[in-house]
Amino acid sequence: MAYQKKPGIKQFHVDCTTEAHSRFQALHEAFALPSKAATFEAILFAVSIKDKIDPQILTGMDSKLDRVLERLNDSL
């Protein structure tokens, strides 16, 4: 079946190793985002801000996010 074009959406294909695909799948499941496109956008955003934000701020954000996720898991 041919790909159905959608306004504002661009199809994107990537050839990657099995290991890279597994890592992406693990990230997609861990982030629990609604789609693989959303996971891909989140990864691109994280990479794009990596050098623009003080690493100490990112570390603090990571630890706060970990605590929030732990509390969320505990409540479920």
Image: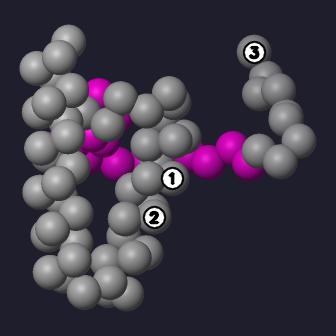
**Residue that appears at 21% across and 49% down:** 65
Q: Is residue 63 above or below residue 25?
A: below
Crowd around label 1: few <14 · some 14–19 · many ≥20 (10 Å): few
Asked if residue 43 shows in the view, the reply is: yes
Crowd around label 2: few <14 · some 14–19 · many ≥20 (10 Å): few
Which image quadrant is residue 75 in?
A: top left
**Residue that appears at 17% across and 54% down:** 64
Which portion, as a residue range, is magenta?
10-29
Q: Is residue 15 above or below residue 49?
A: above
Q: Main secondary structure of the magenta part?
A: helix
Specify whether residue 27 is painted magenta: yes
User: 47 left or right of 12?
Assistant: left
Which residue was labeled with disc 2?
45
Which image quadrant is residue 21 in?
A: top left
Q: Is residue 27 above or below residue 41?
A: above
Give the amino acid type for the residue marked by disc 1 in the picture.
Glu
Quadrant for the N terminus, please.
Answer: top right
User: Residue 40, position in %: x, y?
Assistant: 46, 48
Give the amino acid type for the residue marked by disc 2 in the picture.
Phe
Crowd around label 3: few <14 · some 14–19 · many ≥20 (10 Å): few
User: 2 left or right of 17?
Assistant: right
Which residue was labeled with disc 3?
1
User: Residue 44 or 18: which is nearer the viewer?
Assistant: 44
Mark before the other along the chain sequence, 1 or 3: 3
Q: Is residue 54 above or below residue 59?
A: below
Foreground mark, 1 or 3, reads 1
- The answer to whether the residues at label 2 and label 1 have Cβ atoms under 8 Å apart is yes
User: Residue 68, position in %: x, y?
Assistant: 20, 40
Give the farthest residue toward the right. 7
